[in-house]
Image (cartoon, rainbow, N blue to C red):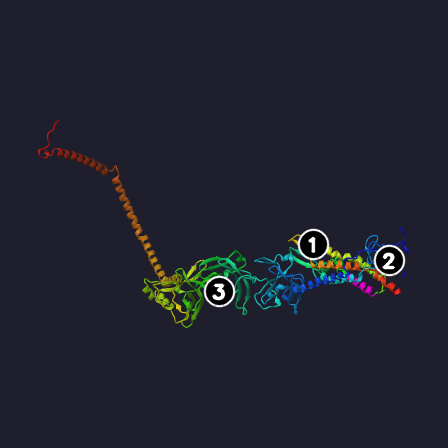
């Protein structure tokens, strides 16, 4: 290569065409970056939802920055921080909600932690075993917005989006019921128990049940609710009775409701209507106790075996039940009166008459009706319902022979006349027999009997000493006589021989007579003419 | 240091093949040997580097705030930012791994941007402060730049591998894009920067 250049052999650069783009264009890159960054930031700020706090008893399973808040299994927020309340009694979860969730964070929105739970009613939240717990939401219906929530410790049984109605039940005790237990209508599960709490005064229990639509329409003001818990084994005057609603209630318990068959048709009950929760089906189906139907029955006999709730029966038809049992002692008159208060639905006994005109004459009010029945001999009596258990019941019946009595309207409750029960009657009769037996002079009878026996003894002795020897003589005589007689009648005895001869003679005589008779028949003339000479 | 630089001698060095050439007439010159365009110094070196660096700074924020990886599995979904991944690894006891990711993904890109900023400012101010150290710093920035992509590689590989639909799924998050952009932009910035500019003030002072 020629070294025509100055110092060293350095080649000369060649001219090149101008580049197509301005170097200033490089500034587009930071501008784009700023735009992109700004857009992301704006998006983040705009999409940022409200921040809320939820307090829980424990943060078990919750993790700041990880735990999600889900509504119908869709993420609507995330737990940001977990801290304590000032008194360390609860934890406070600060959560950032999705923007769309803002209008739903209202007064009655509920939060709870979804964890795996195993209960008698089933297993829930199994998925959270692996994915970790999350916070569930039930959106409320209120319009008042809220930012601080108190989390539920147990998931709600019924979430707000389930149609139906809630009712309030009052009961003496909760039995074996628990929140989440089923509610049955004609053994069909139609709802659940959603809440239970002890009344503030401690005198009862208030339960809330939720009946799903469309079954909530079957709850009317006339509906009766009762405990359908476990096995209902009753042992009363009617004998043994075993009732269960469904197999699951054996373990879990539940509530059942039904409308009384004779209740008037009515429109569905309002939500949150209050009902009484009866102990069992029988109680639930009883007619309501009204003041006007209570009577007092006074008995002289023991009421052992008669229980409150025992039936009052009219020839097999239950017309009431025992409402109370008591005793009153009158120290002046020295009487003990066993009192039984009964709920008597005498109107269940329908009255009929031959004609409409006569029917019209029949009394319609309770008082005169009862008077009429009593005048016709209606009485109450105690009867044994079951010999096995000794349960008693009250029976009403007509006793035409009963002493006349009337209903005592002066006392309150009025006193209905009674008559001793069948068993009691038997007892009284035995008493009378015993009393009479008591009067018999057994001592005297004994003495007399003794004397009699003594004279018998004397008689026997005399017989032995006086009569026996004579009798022996007599017997000897008799034997002798018999011996003579025997000799006389022996076959070879002369008497016998003679007799036999005589008989033979007699026989021959008879023969001759027959021949004579025959001859006379053939020759009657011979009587006159004499025997014909027939020399042949 | 009294060595004559190519620029002082009125010569040009090809960036691509290193051939020294004499300038010819004309505004735009090209290397005789390889055809690469020739400049005394990289044109608009400082302003280009600034542009890339500013863009990188801007994107550094979303890169660290937005999730890099979204993991969805049978047992729920989860999205992780670079920092949350580091924290998770640290808590689960994998300290070396946590350190590696922290250094490669957070510390290095940040340090690189800071280093470039220092270099750019010092060059603009014609500083002669610790020339050799600054040159070393530049070399390190160039060398270490690509290693920052470790995170992106991990995310990319996992995204490609773990796709079992309902069972498990991994998606690259928006943070990954930003992060990748940061790394690439810093590499461009380092590339745009002409280290010879560090030494130029020396002659100016002397001359």
Question: Mark 2 against mark 1, which lies toward the viewer?
Answer: 2
B195 left or right, relative to A388: right
- Closest to the camera, between mark 3 and mark 2, is 2
Crowding around mark 1 (Cα neighbors within 10 Å: few <14, some 14 to 19, many 20+) is some
Considering the numbered disc 3 on the image, is that residue within a helix, a strand or a loop?
A: loop
> Within 10 Å of the Cα at label 3, are there few (<14), some (14-19), or many (20+) other Cα atoms?
some
Q: Which residue is mark 3?
A: A269
Residue B121 is one of the magenta-drawn residues: yes
* Residue visible at 12% across and 33% down in the picture: A523
Q: CA distance from mark 2 to mark 1?
A: 51 Å
Residue B74 screen position, x and y as percent: 64, 55
- Chain letter of disc 2 in the image: B
Residue at (66, 54) in percent of width and height: B168
Please identify the residue farthest to the bottom as the structure is shown.
A332
Q: Residues within 10 Å of mark 2 (few under 14, many from 20)?
A: some
Q: Chain of mark 3?
A: A
- Of A262 and A72, the residue lying toward us: A72
Horizontal arrangement in the rendering, residue A441 relative to residue A534 (left or right): right
Say which element carries label 1: helix
**Secondary structure under badge 2?**
loop
Q: Report which residue position mark 2 lands on.
A: B11
Q: Position of residue B158 (x, y in %)?
A: 70, 54
Q: Which residue is mark 1?
A: B159
Q: Which residues are magenta?
A: B112-125
């Amino acid at each position: 290569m020629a070294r025509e250049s100055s110092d060293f052999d350095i080649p000369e650069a060649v001219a090149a065409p101008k580049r197509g783009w301005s170097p200033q264009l490089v500034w587009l890159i930071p501008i784009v970056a700023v735009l992109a960054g700004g857009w992301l930031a704006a998006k983040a700020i705009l999409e940022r939802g409200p921040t809320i706090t939820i307090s829980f008893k424990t943060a078990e399973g919750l993790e700041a920055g990880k735990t999600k808040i889900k509504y119908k299994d869709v993420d609507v927020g995330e737990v940001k921080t977990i801290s304590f309340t000032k008194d360390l009694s609860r934890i406070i979860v600060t959560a950032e909600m999705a923007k769309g969730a803002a209008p739903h964070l209202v007064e009655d929105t509920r939060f709870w932690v979804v964890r795996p739970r195993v209960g008698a009613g089933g297993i829930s939240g199994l998925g959270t075993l692996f994915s970790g717990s999350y916070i569930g939401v039930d959106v409320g219906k209120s319009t008042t917005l809220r930012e601080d929530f108190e989390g539920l410790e147990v998931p709600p049984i019924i979430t707000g989006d389930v149609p139906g109605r809630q009712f309030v039940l009052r009961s003496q005790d909760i039995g074996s019921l628990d929140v989440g237990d089923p509610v049955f209508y004609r053994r069909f599960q139609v709802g659940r128990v959603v809440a239970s709490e002890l009344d503030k005064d401690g005198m009862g229990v208030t339960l809330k049940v939720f009946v799903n639509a469309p079954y909530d329409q079957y709850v009317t003001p006339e509906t009766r609710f009762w405990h359908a818990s476990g096995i209902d084994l009753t042992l009363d005057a009617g004998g043994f009775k075993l009732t269960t609603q469904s197999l699951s209630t054996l373990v879990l318990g539940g509530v059942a409701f039904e409308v009384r068959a004779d209740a008037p048709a009515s429109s569905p009950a309002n939500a949150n209507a209050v009902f009484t929760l009866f102990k069992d089906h029988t109680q639930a189906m009883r007619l309501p106790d009204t003041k006007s139907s209570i009577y007092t029955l006074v008995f002289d006999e023991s009421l052992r075996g008669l229980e409150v709730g025992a039936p009052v029966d009219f020839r097999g038809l239950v017309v009431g039940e025992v409402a109370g049992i008591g005793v009153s002692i009158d120290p002046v008159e020295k009487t003990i009166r066993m009192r039984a208060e009964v709920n008597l639905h005498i109107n269940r006994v329908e009255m009929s008459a031959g004609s409409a005109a006569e029917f019209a004459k029949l009394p319609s009010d309770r008082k005169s009706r009862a008077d009429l029945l009593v005048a016709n001999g209606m009485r109450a009596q105690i009867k044994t319902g079951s010999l096995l258990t000794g349960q008693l019941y009250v029976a009403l019946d007509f006793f035409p022979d009963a002493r006349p009595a009337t209903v005592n309207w002066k006392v309150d409750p009025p006193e209905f006349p009674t008559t001793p029960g069948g068993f009691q009657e038997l007892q009284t009769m035995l008493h009378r027999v015993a009393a009479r037996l008591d009067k018999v002079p057994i001592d005297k009878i004994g003495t007399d009997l003794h004397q009699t026996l003594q004279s018998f003894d004397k008689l026997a002795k005399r017989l032995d000493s006086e009569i026996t020897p004579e009798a022996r003589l007599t017997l000897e005589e008799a034997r002798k006589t018999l011996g003579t007689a025997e000799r006389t009648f022996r076959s070879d005895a002369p008497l016998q021989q003679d007799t036999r001869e005589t008989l033979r003679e007699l026989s021959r005589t008879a023969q001759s007579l027959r021949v004579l008779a025959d001859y006379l028949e053939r020759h009657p003339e011979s009587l006159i003419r004499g025997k014909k000479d027939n020399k042949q | 240091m009294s060595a004559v630089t190519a620029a002082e001698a009125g010569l040009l060095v090809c960036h691509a093949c290193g051939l020294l050439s004499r300038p010819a007439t004309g505004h735009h010159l090209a290397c005789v040997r390889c055809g690469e365009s020739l400049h005394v110094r990289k044109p608009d070196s400082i302003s280009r580097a600034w542009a890339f660096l500013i863009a990188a700074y801007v994107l550094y924020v979303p890169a660290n705030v937005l999730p890099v990886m979204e993991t969805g599995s049978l047992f729920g979904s989860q999205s992780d930012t670079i920092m949350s991944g580091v924290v998770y690894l640290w808590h689960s006891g994998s300290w070396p791994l946590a350190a590696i990711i922290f250094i490669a993904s957070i510390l290095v890109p940040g340090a690189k941007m800071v280093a470039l900023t220092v270099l750019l400012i010092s060059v603009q101010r014609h500083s002669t402060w610790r020339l050799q150290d600054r040159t070393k710093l530049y070399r390190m920035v160039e060398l270490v730049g690509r290693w920052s992509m470790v995170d992106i590689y991990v995310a990319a590989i996992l995204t490609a591998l773990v796709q079992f639909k309902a069972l498990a799924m991994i998606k690259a998050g928006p943070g990954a894009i930003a992060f990748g952009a940061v790394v690439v932009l810093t590499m461009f910035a380092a590339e745009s920067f002409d280290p010879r500019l560090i030494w130029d003030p020396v002659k100016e002072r002397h001359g």
